[in-house]
Amino acid sequence: MPPSKAVAAIADEAPGGARLDGTPASIQGWGGGGRTPVTLVRARAADDLDAALASWRDSPGAGAVARGMGRSYGDAAQLTGGLVLDTSALKHFDVDPIGGTVTAEAGATIGELLSVVVPAGWMVPVVPGTQHVTVGGAIAADIHGKNHGRAGTFGTHVEALGLLTSGGELLELEPGRDRERFSATTGGMGLSGVILWARIRLLAVSGALLSVDTDRVADLEGALSALAAPGGEYRVAWLDLLGGGSGRGIVTRARHVDLPAGAETARGRAGAVARATVPARWPAGLLRPATVRAFNELRFRIAPHRERGRLEAIGAHMFPLDVLDAWPRLYGPRGLVQYQLVVPAGQEHALHSVLDRLHRSRVPCYLAVLKDFGAANEAPLSFPLRGWTLALDMPRAAPGLGELLDGFDELVAGVGGRVYLAKDSHLRPATLAAMYPRLGEWRRVRDELDPDGLWRSDLGVRTGLIPPRPQ
Amino acid sequence: MSANAGTRVLLVGGTSEIGLAIVRRLGMREPVRAVLMGRDPAALAAAADALEREHHAAAVSVQPLDAAQLSAHESAVADAFERFEGFDLVVLAIGVLGAQAGLDADPAQAAEVMRVNFVDTGSLLLELLRRLRAQRHGTLVVLSSVAAERARAGNAVYGAAKAGLDALAQGLADATAATGIRVLVVRPGFVRGRMTAGLKPAPMATTPDAVADATVRALDTRAHTVWVPGRLRFVFALLRHLPRPIYRRLPL
């Protein structure tokens, strides 16, 4: 049951007051960096969205895009000079504890879902590295988790979703019935319409605890083989790229544990609780190679060489960064760029080349995360494909970053890989087409859904996902 | 799988043949979660892999420990007990044999044998017992040697060091008995294995598996000392009281 039944029908009676015309605001991506002026509408109910669009649709040069918690690192959920529909207050959701599904409005976050479904014996089957992403964002970016090899992407587990089209129509899309439009929306970066709600299949679990295996590795080769070792389905490697360039790291493999009824369930938390926040005026320059190198050294030393079966709460294991609110502020006012790439299995040499180039450049990489991916799905813009994904966090202000990323783009595209649009701040149209060969297919479906080209975003314009504004 | 099921075993000296044999033997009869502590991470990881592969223990973890660094004993043992939330059984299996020479031993090597077998191991023994006492339950197995009962001319250095450790373990066992902590001292004879490779086996030589077998059987009893093979108990009961002029002439 969709939480909002008939947006279009109610739209006519919607109170078209000043608040729905939106207010001027300046917003930025999660990675920080420049703010951009937009007109912001904070929807209190799904009906508000259509009311806001009704007055905006006819203004010349209008464009609009939905925004959730603003966790995209780059410019995916903003449109300079355009209308931004903030759906983060649309949080209602219903759990079907027998059938194992949750039907959630777009603004419900993964953390909010987990806090309810885990105690009921269910797990959101795909969770990203932060619990603060919305259901709408998770579908639009077709996010993946540490368990991609087993579970695929978030979109794989969506049974149905509600999409508000540019014409004000509410479509209920199911993957079986509306394959093309559904697949254009999962991974569609919000450019096929506004996702209003979704019904998500859950995974049965017996508690909030994971059994975690840990191995220290000496280099990239060690990390690749530890990620491929048998063990838990949640697999990830943290690499220390400041400690001499060898790429030493820590690999964890985790799985859900079956607990005897009533045992130890109180120990595990489904979510992560923020214990501190980074103040808004954090001084730039404290996050320097020397300080991060010291931190990495400590992190590496306290990690066990090899540990098996350590029990950890889902929240603590999945969302380690969530304990520090607003952590990108550590990077100072210019913020950070996260560059996430995937290269197909068999092209591991490209990972070596990336690390090698990074090492030779003067760009410091403060956080590097490596994971294995399973097979790609059928959504044309979905990021994962079978192989290896590497995410690199670098200060946006680092000299030479642009040239370095240009080189990475070329290298990654050359081996049949791609970069993740949800994190992107850099990609150009020519490389986009090379990385996402099914772009034309996606554009055709998108244009059918949005013939007037209402849905636009800074990401879409910059990368050429959507054509330049007609006329 | 079920979480945290099984006897939690800490093996200090994580690549010790006898120590690993004890973990294996225990794992044959009950679920075991083991932590191997030692200096060489690669060797420890290989030992852990083998235990898991042979299904003798589930969830085998590895913790770093440099036994030669006395000042680090307290924190290393504390880290292990905290990280793994305590242990039911601790096996102290650190030791070196050295060249089996008495008076003619290389001085540096003789000092090393005494340091490792008594000072390093003794310091760990104290630290481990303190931790067991704090958690109010658990058993500590200390690998001693029959040489501790009466050293011979040929192994005086090794025997004396082991005698020191053996005496320390027995004394502390009596000190902690009232708190429910048990100390089991294991005194093997000549053990054929890596440590004695190239040496001519002494009479009544045994194997790491036999030592492990006897140790695990002794855990079920109230024994505080176990000899392997068991006959050595009576042999040494006799040897201990032999007059020195006779003892020193024995072809041991």
Image: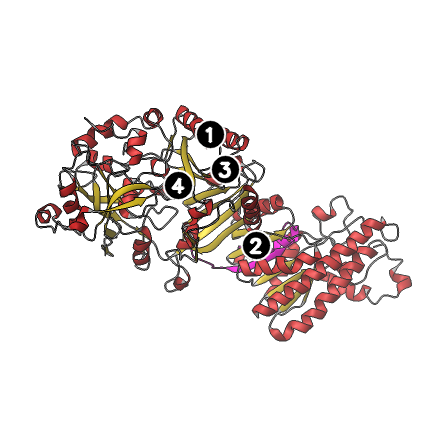
Of pointers 4 and 3, the one earlier in the residue sequence = 4
Could you classify mark 4 by the number of other residues whose Cα lies within 10 Å: few (under 14), some (14-19), or many (20 or more)?
many
In this rendering, position of residue B122 left or right of residue B50: right
The residue carrying pointer 1 sits among few (fewer than 14), some (14 to 19) or many (20 or more) residues within 10 Å by Cα, namely: some
Residue that badge 3 annotates: A225
Under circle 1, the secondary element is helix
Q: Which residue is mark 2?
A: B35
Report the chain holding disc 3.
Answer: A
Q: Amino acid at mark 2?
A: Val
Q: Do marks 4 and 2 share a subunit?
A: no
What is the secondary structure assignment of the residue under circle 4?
loop
Q: Nearer the viewer, residue A416 or A327?
A: A327
Q: Which residue is mark 1?
A: A404
- Badge 3, how many Cα within 10 Å: few under 14, some, many 20+? few
Tell me which segment is drawn in magenta.
B1-28
Q: Position of residue B224 (x, y in %)?
A: 67, 68
Residue A79: % across, % down: 27, 38
User: Helix, strand, or loop for circle 3?
Assistant: helix
Q: Using the rendered image of the protein, determine whether residue B32 is visible from the camera's viewpoint.
A: yes
Real-space Cα separation, disc 2 to disc 1, in angstroms? 44 Å
- Asked if residue B18 is among those painted magenta in the image, a careful observer would answer yes
Q: Secondary structure at mark 2?
A: strand
Q: Position of residue B24 (x, y in %)?
A: 57, 53
Q: CA distance from mark 1 to mark 4?
A: 18 Å
Q: From the image, state whether disc 2 or disc 1 is nearer to you.
A: 1
Could you say which is closer to the camera, residue A9 or residue A24?
A24
Q: Which residue is mark 4?
A: A33
User: What residue sits 78% from the left and 66% below the top?
Assistant: B237
